[in-house]
Image (tube, rainbow, N blue to C red):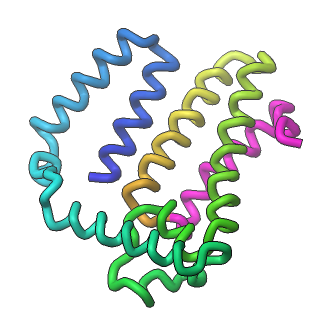
């Protein structure tokens, strides 16, 4: 379900940037309705009182308690399950619990830099034919990536950082890499 929500967020942003507000709103509403009606059975069973949802809330609460106990550097990398039997199912919560506010600052900073560099690429107007679509796709990918990170613990997964690296490399090639310098 987290992947479906991430896909919906990514598709929403891409269609908004490519098709405009009204067409995108109608398209996304139609796709979401189709997912609910035709999608996997777990999509139809989303409820706040479901065991999975409650387990995530408890995991997030435990992660915040870990942050409270060790606010600067956290409880240690890959030690979340030493203090709670399940992962956080939220990359942000897991990062701040394991690496504290210092690690959380850098984790959020990477995402911030990603979007700022892509915004700078759009502002420079240095894009050739087809490049604007690629920039829009990278922005939509980043939104989907971070939306998925809110529902999954993927902070140590290489594909997570591959998207970030792709955006940084693209911004560098387009001359917008120095925007944060």
Q: Total label count?
A: 0
Q: Residue drawn at (25%, 28%), measured in percent from left and top? A: 31
Q: Residue drawn at (67%, 46%), measured in percent from left and top? A: 166
Left or right relative to 98: residue 48? left
Residue 100: % across, % down = 61, 71
Position of residue 27 relative to residue 67, above or below, is: above
Whether the magenta-drawn stretch holds residue 174 is answered as yes
Left or right relative to 60: residue 71? right
Q: Residue drawn at (51%, 85%), measured in percent from left and top? A: 79
Image quadrant for the C terminus? top right
The magenta segment: 155-181
Q: Quadrant of residue 99?
A: bottom right
Left or right relative to 116: residue 176? right
**Residue found at the far bottom of this picture:** 82
Residue 179: % across, % down = 84, 35
Q: Residue drawn at (56%, 68%), measured in percent from left and top? A: 96
Q: Quadrant of residue 105?
A: bottom right
Q: Main secondary structure of the magenta part?
A: helix
**Residue found at the far front of this picture:** 68
Whether the magenta-drawn stretch holds residue 166 is answered as yes
Residue 5: % across, % down = 32, 44
Q: Quadrant of residue 88?
A: bottom left
Position of residue 100 relative to residue 164, above or below, is: below
Residue 152: % across, % down = 40, 61
């Amino acid at each position: 379900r987290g992947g479906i929500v991430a896909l919906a967020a990514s598709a929403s942003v891409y269609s908004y940037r490519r098709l405009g507000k009204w067409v995108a709103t109608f398209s996304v509403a139609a796709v979401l309705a189709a997912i609910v009606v035709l999608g996997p059975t777990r999509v139809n069973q989303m409820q706040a009182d479901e065991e999975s949802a409650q387990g995530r809330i408890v995991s997030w609460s435990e992660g915040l308690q870990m942050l409270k106990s060790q606010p600067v550097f956290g409880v240690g990398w890959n030690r979340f399950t030493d203090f709670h039997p399940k992962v956080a199912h939220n990359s942000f919560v897991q990062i701040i619990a394991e690496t504290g506010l210092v690690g959380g600052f850098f984790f959020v900073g990477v995402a911030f830099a990603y979007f700022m560099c892509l915004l700078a690429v759009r502002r420079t107007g240095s894009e050739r034919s087809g490049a604007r679509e690629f920039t829009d796709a990278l922005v939509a990918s980043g939104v989907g990536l971070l939306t998925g990170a809110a529902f999954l613990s993927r902070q140590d997964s290489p594909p997570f950082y591959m998207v970030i690296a792709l955006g940084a490399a693209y911004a560098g090639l387009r001359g917008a890499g120095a925007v944060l310098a």
